[in-house]
Image (tube, helix red, strand yellow):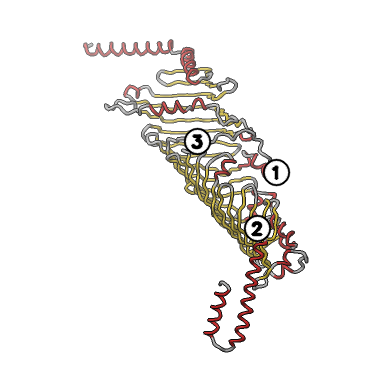
Amino acid sequence: MSRKKKILVYGGSALLVLLLALIILVRLLITPERIKGWALPLLEETLQREVLLADVEIGLFSGIALHDLRIQDRDGKNTLLRIEDLVLSYRFRPLLSGRLVIDEIRLVGPSIRLVRHADGTMNIDDLLGSAAAEETAALPTAEPAADGTGIDLLVSRVLLEDGDLLLVNSADPAGNLHLQDIRLLATNISLEDAFPLELSARFNGTGFRVDGEFQPAAATGRLDLFVERLDLNQFLPAAAETAETPPRQSQQTGPPAAEPGPIEVPITLVGSVRIDELLYQQLTVQDIRAEYQLKDNHFQLQQLSGELFAGQFNLQSDVDLGKKGFAYQGDFSLDNVDLQSLVPALMPQAEKSSHGLLKLQLAFSGAGTDPERLLRQLDAKGSFQLAEGKLMGNPLLTELATFLGNPQLKILSFQSLTGHYDLRQQLAQVKVALDSSKTRLDTSGTVHLDGQLALQLEARLAPEMLQGVNPDSPLRRALTDADGWAVLPLNIAGTYQDPKISLSGKALRSQAEQQLKQKLEEKVQEKVQEKLGGEGEPARKLLDDSLKKLFGK
């Protein structure tokens, strides 16, 4: 055997012996007990929580597996995180060339229990502290080595299965959220290129599916959500009960909870949402489609549309997550929605109160998630139109019919009901007009969100509506227009549920003055015409112009 071959044989044998020795040494020194004795105290000190681990398996050339890993809450009473099995499989040979190739990261049965306390804090706030976030942000960004010796990471497959996420609301257990059967699959993951991912979960019997991709280097991605049938009544029982139980006074005695935000979202996401059918109380919405974007701490609904009771709805909005309370603005519209179906679905107690096809436009803005703050800061402006409709059982109509002594006014069929409104600081300026063959109502004034009314109403009633009216009815005092319609100016005070209607003395006097002026003008014109006789058209025109100036027309 040549000297060169002997060196290769002896060198290879020595390398093999060293490798075997290394394996034996790893087996002797890196034992599950040693790892638990070293890693668990370090984790407990870092997390300030008790950490438990049932078993660990280590393969120098294959990977590592952890079994039954548990992280307790700070008080030690409940488990914050549990993972039944965590498996990391990698390839050894690529490490020698500076490449970290991971065949699989697999998490089996991970479960997380998050708690939102009554004061708005959460059981993981200490792990998400702002100080830690600032320190992380201050760290220099890792740059690849100039000589190209940086580690090249590639993960072939990440799989999470049988996951469980429970969000406990301490203040209102009915508001708990529970995600089950969570499954996440991502493949061909690298730090530079975009990789695909799939996510599915079940939420109170409803299945969700998300498909998309993410690019770590640019912190950008796309996520598309699909739900075949979403029944909100299954996991919003409080909302379903609203229609069946009267509103209760707020039990909150202390100050309102702190508003969320501002938050910084360091990624950019775009995507779509598709929900074939959505149920809420008795409301059914179909063919919901949306396009969204999350960028620069703004969440934008670029387009949200759907079918609602033979009509359509559309919404565009922008939420600023970088402001406390999440400032928002947007536009909402309804087009030819059947009110006879919509009203009982939202308010069963008012099932037969309104009929007609509704068109609505609304521009809104505000901030806040607490209901009181939200209403206080809400601004809204828009218009509505209700065609070929009917109103009945309305407290205002009932009071109007009683005040005027005409029961026919309790139910009003109309050709059109139009209105404009401008809401600021919980007070809405409104202007509404109702037009029917027998009744015309023009209303203007203010409506407070607490129901307080300060309105002026001009009621016009056709001659047939005056037949059979009680002698003491205010209609007997009403003046009539050129078509014989009774015209009655009214004031409306009180609340929506308990309105108070009275005659407007000032408007009545103004009406009487205008009508007296008109009759006087007609009388003067009649007398002068008799005198003029056949003086011709120029004389009549001169007379008309003179009378208009005289009576302020």
- Amino acid bearing label 2: His
Mark 3 or mark 1, which has the lower sequence index?
Answer: 1
Query: Callout 3: 10 Å neighbours few (<14), some, many (20+)?
Result: some
Mark 2 or 3: in front is 3
Q: Nearer the viewer, residue 358 or 205?
A: 358
Q: Position of residue 333 (x, y in %)?
A: 54, 53
Q: Quick one: quadrant of the C terminus?
A: bottom right
Q: Nearer the viewer, mark 2 or mark 1?
A: 1
As rendered, which of 319 and 509 lies closer to the eye?
509
Whether 547 is drawn above or below 116: the answer is: below
Q: Which image quadrant is residue 167 in?
A: top right
The disc placed on residue 355 is: 2
User: Which of the 4 image quarters holds residue 149?
Assistant: top left
Residues at circles 3 and 1 in contact by the CB criterion of under 8 Å:
no
CB atoms at circles 2 and 3 under 8 Å apart? Answer: no
Give the residue number, with chain letter if any, for mark 1. Answer: 246
Q: Quick one: SS at disc 1?
A: loop
